[in-house]
Image (cartoon, helix red, strand yellow):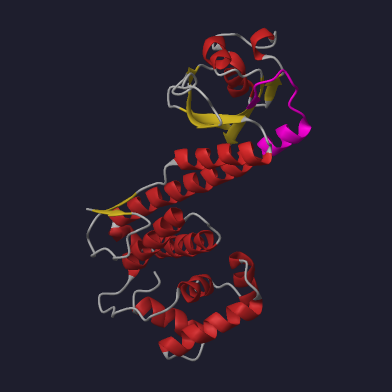
Amino acid sequence: MLRATHQSAIPPERGEEIVYLRPDDGDAFRQAVRVVRQRADVPVAFGGQVAAEGSLHLSEFVGVRTSALKGLQIRAAAGLGGQVMTSRRPGAVSDYGSALTISHDYDVPVLAEGICSVAAVPVTVHGRVRGVIYGAARGVVPLGDRVLDTMVDATRRLAGELAVRDEVDRRLQLLDVADADRTALRDSVAIEEVRELHAEFRAIAKGLDDAVLRDRLHRACERLAHLTDSRDAVDPPALSPRELDVLSQIALGCSNAETARRLSLKPETVKAYLRSAMRKLDVHTRHEAVVAARRRGALP
């Protein structure tokens, strides 16, 4: 069994099982907390993820002076965070200790940190609250619209990152099913679905900043290519990742313009990559390039 991480550069032997490690979502929450602290210019920022049982676990902190909040479990509807989890809407109080709009289950740890003004924003992915990000001040001062807008923007970006990770996991699960039953790939429809999945993986990977996710997708593409390659496949040519990106879209029947749009490239750039791939494969047409890449096991 191989464990593929962003440090792995050795392709798997055929027949070996690969476990793709999802990046730690805590890292993404940690980055969002730091962004809120810096861009919203609040003294304290913290947050965490909603656990499987439905409670919010506070795990990420910037600017705290004590350990009072660390590891705190927030129940749904309890305190400001619990209220935000239930309503799925941002909330704020200017004096936590005397606020009448929230319950006071967590007054002891909150006031021990000296926090007075607090804003909380849910991290919502496809209608489900996955966590909460907080911004806070130690004085009794309202946190204005600018602070809340900054927090909302940070949580939207975080939600988008989690959504991408979820989609990658979903598609990798589909790949596992296909890999477990290769006989299903004898059906032409199944083969086309694998090819579409391969092209989508490469298109998604191109726009990612997360090196771990990019590696997961590229390793998944290798598995997909191996699912349908012929027994007489030879060593794949030294095609660059961008050339493979372009060929994967061409293999679906996309025009240069469609390929450019899907990969966020200029049509002229697509043409250049295609010409380079054709030269390496020693072919003269785009169709021949796809056939040659498949024969060599570079494309499914």
The image position of residue 170, as x and y in percent, is: 44, 46
Whether residue 236 is in magenta: the answer is: no
Residue 159 visible within the image: no
Whether residue 145 is in magenta: the answer is: yes
Q: Name above or below for residue 260 compared with residue 175.
A: below
Residue 24 visible within the image: yes
Q: Residue at x 55, y 19 (%)?
A: 113
Q: Name above or below for residue 298 compared with residue 145.
A: below
Q: Name above or below for residue 226 compared with residue 145.
A: below
Where, by quadrant of the figure, is residue 240 drawn? bottom left
Q: Residue at x 46, y 73 (%)?
A: 244
Q: In front: 74, or 173?
A: 74
- Does residue 132 appear to the left or right of 148 in the view shown? left
Q: On the rendered image, what quadrant is the C terminus found in?
A: bottom left
Q: Residue at x 49, y 76 (%)?
A: 243
Count of all numbered marks drawn on residues in the image: 0
Q: In front: 278, or 132?
A: 132
The image position of residue 190, as x and y in percent, is: 41, 60
Where, by quadrant of the figure, is residue 125 drawn? top right
Q: In front: 151, or 224?
A: 151
Residue at the farthest right position:
145
The image position of residue 136, as x and y in percent, is: 64, 26
- Does residue 290 appear to the left or right of 15 in the view shown? right
Over which residues does the magenta segment extend?
136-152
Q: Residue at x 24, y 64 (%)?
A: 14
The image position of residue 141, as x and y in percent, is: 74, 21
Where, by quadrant of the figure, is residue 230 drawn? bottom left
